[in-house]
Image (cartoon, rainbow, N blue to C red):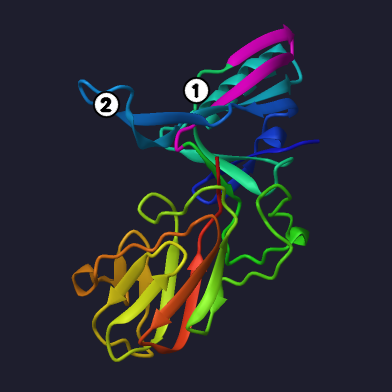
């Protein structure tokens, strides 16, 4: 039986078992693209200003079974109480083991067909416009682990996300660019530098520079900002951002030795 999981505050709940739901079908809307243009008075058409992705709906049709009429009303109320949260959570369908979607619920359709039986269509709004892998790149990329799947952009190659050299590749299996200002991406750097450690993504030209010396006991972390040993250090940098393009990203690190560099991020999918 296909299972529906809800991930809330790091805890996984099996909704199919908790509420005796049998999934009949599940489907999602196509990516909801918003095309942006700049228009000028007196000019034909518009100038391309790029595209963004809007929220979309994910719906799951279920058979809902209870023992009798009294139990039916109790369980319906329990289901409502559980899925209607004020904060977001993620849903995960067992048929897509490697993907989950951060959502808010929207009003659902309940059609009672007998004393203890109903058809329920659960509808969730994927408000950030994309799904993400069930785990991150620091979990081994093996299909035997049951948390990765085919059709996730993975290739049969031995990609590593922790490196000890100054030149290496990082593979982004997403079908979108990873930008730490809007997506989860944490780069952790340890090593030794007399100053101006320079991290360069040769694929897209992004460059980050940390100007002070780096000691072997220091940890430099890049995500939405920069931290040294847990303390903000943006003023000691060039305020650069390291993004990851789809596919292989070629990296080179200058002015540093005895490196240990790790890239921790989930893949994202339209």
Which secondary structure lies at badge 2? loop
- CA distance separating discs 1 and 2: 35 Å
Residue 163 shown in magenta: no
Which residue is identified by label 2? Answer: 39
Q: Quadrant of residue 226?
A: bottom left
Label 1: how many residues lie within 10 Å, few (<14), some (14-19) or many (20+)? some
Quadrant, the C terminus: top right
Q: Report the disc number at residue 212.
A: none
From what the image shows, is residue 92 above or below residue 172? above
Q: Main secondary structure of the magenta part?
A: strand
Residue 120 location in percent, x, y?
Answer: 66, 18
Query: Bounds of the magenta span?
Result: 109-128
From what the image shows, is residue 236 above or below residue 45? below
Label 2: how many residues lie within 10 Å, few (<14), some (14-19) or many (20+)? few
Q: Residue at x 61, y 72 (%)?
A: 160
Q: Residue at x 34, y 78 (%)?
A: 198
Quadrant, the N terminus: top right
Which residue is identified by label 1? Answer: 106
User: Would you say 51 lies left or right of 97 here?
Assistant: left
User: Would you say 62 lies left or right of 106 here?
Assistant: right
For marks 1 and 2 on the same chain, the one whose residue lies earlier in the sequence:
2
Residue 75 location in percent, x, y?
Answer: 63, 23
Q: Quadrant of residue 235?
A: bottom left
Residue 116 location in percent, x, y?
Answer: 74, 14
Residue 128 location in percent, x, y?
Answer: 45, 38
């Amino acid at each position: 039986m296909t299972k529906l999981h809800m991930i809330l505050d790091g805890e996984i709940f099996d909704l199919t078992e908790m509420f005796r739901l049998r999934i009949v079908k599940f489907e999602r809307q196509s990516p909801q693209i918003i095309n942006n243009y700049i228009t000028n008075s007196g000019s034909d058409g518009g100038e391309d200003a790029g595209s963004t992705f809007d929220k979309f709906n994910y719906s799951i049709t279920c058979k809902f079974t209870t023992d009798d009429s009294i139990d039916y009303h109790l369980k319906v109320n329990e289901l409502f109480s559980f899925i209607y949260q004020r904060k977001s959570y993620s849903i995960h369908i067992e048929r897509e083991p490697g993907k989950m979607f951060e959502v808010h619920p929207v009003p659902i359709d309940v059609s009672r067909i007998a004393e203890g039986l109903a058809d329920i269509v659960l509808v969730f709004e994927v408000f950030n416009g994309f799904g993400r892998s069930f785990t991150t790149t620091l979990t081994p990329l093996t299909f035997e682990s049951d948390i990765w799947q085919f059709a996730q952009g993975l290739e049969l190659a031995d990609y590593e996300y922790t490196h000890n050299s100054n030149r290496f590749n990082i593979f982004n299996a997403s079908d979108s660019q990873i930008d730490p200002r809007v997506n989860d991406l944490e780069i952790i750097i340890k090593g030794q530098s007399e100053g101006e450690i320079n991290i360069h993504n040769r694929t897209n030209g992004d460059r980050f520079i940390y100007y002070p010396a780096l000691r072997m006991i220091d940890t430099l972390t890049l995500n939405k900002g920069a931290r040294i040993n847990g303390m903000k250090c943006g003023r000691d940098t060039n305020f650069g951002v390291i993004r990851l393009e789809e596919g292989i990203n070629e990296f080179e690190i200058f002015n540093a030795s005895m490196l240990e560099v790790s890239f921790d991020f989930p893949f994202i999918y339209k």
